[in-house]
Amino acid sequence: MSLHTRAPSEVGPGSSERKPSKGLVARNRKTRRGTSFPYLLVLPALALFVLVIGYPFVQSLAFAFTDRSLLGTEENFVGFENIAAFISAPSFGPILWQTIVFVGASTLGAFVVALALALALNTRMAAVGALRTGFLIPWILPGVVVSFVWLWIFDTNYGVLNGAIKMFGLGEGNTNWLDSPQLAMTAIVVAKIWHSFPWMTILILAALQGVPSEVHDAAAVDGASAWKKQIFVILPQIKPALALTLLLETIWGLQQFEIPYVMTSGGPVGSTTTFSIALYKAAFSDFDLGKAGAIGAIWTILMSLLVAIYVVYTIKQEKD
């Protein structure tokens, strides 16, 4: 009786490869399903964003290249005529300058106040928590409410500011704060600072309290005084947070509409008209959607430049 051994089968060029098991296929499908599930959850919010913000934004930019009016349905393509007309208009220079003054002064003013308060509150005292909550009140108030608060403060006849000036003998107390082209911008800047400094204070304070204790100890060993330690040791540690705070407030300042519009409506004699107010008046006072779209396009370019600066700065910080 002979024993025949079967030679092991060789996989040739025409042979089919071994198929994966059903369990492995099921696991792969489950993994792919688990990876795509978070994106499915984001879809409703993304669709809402496109519907509520994305489409109107693109449509408003498209108006910049037409002669569309709010009162009519006809529109013709006019190219860059609206943008060129707005830039060449005599009002463009003052509007641009007033926007820079409003955004720059309110941002820097709020930053200085916030930084000073954050440095003062950078302690472990129990009262700090309550103070933080109190500081947030101006920020959580709607811009319209903030505007009416400061309208009352700056009122010529019954305002708190004029009343205090008269009470302490600093003047007659009859200054027309909001009716003066020289003082109206100061009034809305002060209101914007009061509205913005709380969130900046909280963010800077959080960054200060994130500085390692070893840095404080090293500064104390070197004999640095309290203010030198804050200026030359602690603040350089939180430069990214300070830059982020300034950039965000600048962007939000460009977007600010309620405070200057409710308090002055861009007046007197256009002395507080910013890009946001000019856009609103072009659309809803002049009914010129083409002009409003042109203003919006220029406005968008300015904000896009700021966002690009922030992105470049963030990438640089991550590399460092």
Image: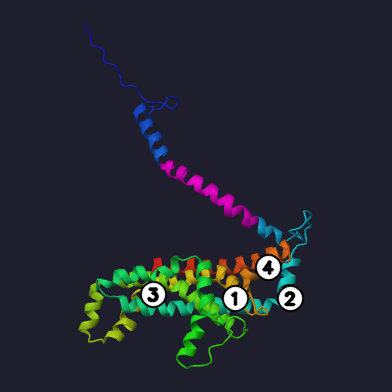
Question: Mark 1 packing: few (<14 Cα in 10 Å), some, or many (20+)?
Answer: many
Q: Amino acid at mark 4?
A: Lys
Q: Residue at x 29, y 16 (%)?
A: 6
The amino acid type, in three-letter code, at marker 2 is Ala
Task: Give the numbered dot on residue 89.
Answer: 2
Q: Nearer the viewer, mark 3 or mark 1?
A: 1
Which of the two residues, 44 or 271, is positioned nearer the viewer here?
271
Disc 2 to disc 3, C-alpha distance: 40 Å
* x then y, percent, for residue 20: 37, 29
Q: Closer to the N terminus: mark 2 or mark 3?
A: 2
Q: Amino acid at mark 1?
A: Thr
Please state which of residues 122 and 268 is positioned toward the viewer in this rendering: 268
In this picture, residue 81 sits left or right of residue 319: right
Q: Does the magenta portion include 38?
A: yes
Q: Magenta segment range?
A: 35-58
Which amino acid lies under the numbered mark 3 shown in the image of this protein?
Lys
Mark with earlier residue (3, 1): 1
Using the numbered discs, state the Cα–Cα distance from disc 2 to disc 1 in whole angstroms.
16 Å
Q: Which residue is mark 3?
A: 239
Residue highlighted by disc 4: 281
Judge the density around disc 2: few (<14), some (14-19), many (≥20) Cα neighbours within 10 Å. Answer: few
Mark 2 / mark 4, whichever is N-terminal = 2
Check whether the beta carbons of the residues at disc 2 and disc 3 lie within 8 A of each other. Answer: no
On the image, the x and y values in percent for residue 44 come to: 50, 45
